[in-house]
Amino acid sequence: WSVAEVKDWALKTFGSEAIAEKFEEEEIDGRILLTTSVQSSSAMERLGLVTLGKQGKFLEKINQLGAGPSAGTLCIYIH
């Protein structure tokens, strides 16, 4: 998944252009999105996910993506 696709996913997930732009600024692509490095509290805060609710939603969505049958799972959520 490209950085642009992840940005679209973030926009649809959080409904915030500011958060989506943070994902783009940090160059988060699909591979990086599923790594544990973006799942730390400090990384989530850096991405604009400062509330516990947004962090919880992010972790839930990441777990759903990671459990998908293939790398194409993200496309289901953003299209």
Image: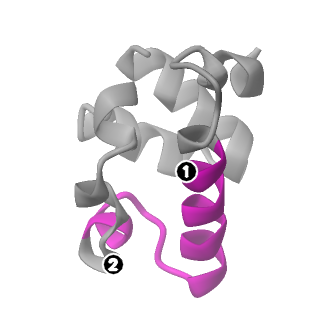
In the displayed structure image, the side of residue 59 where residue 35 appears, left or right: left
Circle 1 sits on which residue? Answer: 62
Could you say which is closer to the camera, residue 72 or residue 17?
A: 72
Secondary structure category for the residue under label 1: helix
For the question of whether residue 49 can be seen, the reply is yes
| Looking at the image, residue 6 lies above or below residue 57 | above
Secondary structure category for the residue under label 2: helix
Name the amino acid, label 1: Ile
Q: Position of residue 57 (x, y in %)?
A: 66, 66
Mark found first going from the N terminus, 1 or 2 = 2
Q: Which corner quadrant of the image does residue 25 belong to?
A: top left
Residue 74 within the magenta-colored segment of the rendering: no
Q: Position of residue 33 (x, y in %)?
A: 38, 41
Instruction: Determine the residue positioned at 57% across, 19% down.
Output: 70
Q: Position of residue 39 (x, y in %)?
A: 36, 64
Name the amino acid, label 2: Ser
Query: Which stretch is magenta?
Result: 43-64
Quarter of the image for the N terminus: give it: top left
| Looking at the image, residue 75 lies above or below residue 15 | above
Judge the density around disc 2: few (<14), some (14-19), many (≥20) Cα neighbours within 10 Å.
Answer: some
User: Magenta span: helix, strand or loop, mainly?
Assistant: helix
CA separation, marks 1 and 2? 14 Å
Q: Which corner quadrant of the image does residue 36 belong to?
A: bottom left
Total label count? 2
In the displayed structure image, the side of residue 32 where residue 66 appears, left or right: right
Circle 2 sits on which residue? Answer: 41
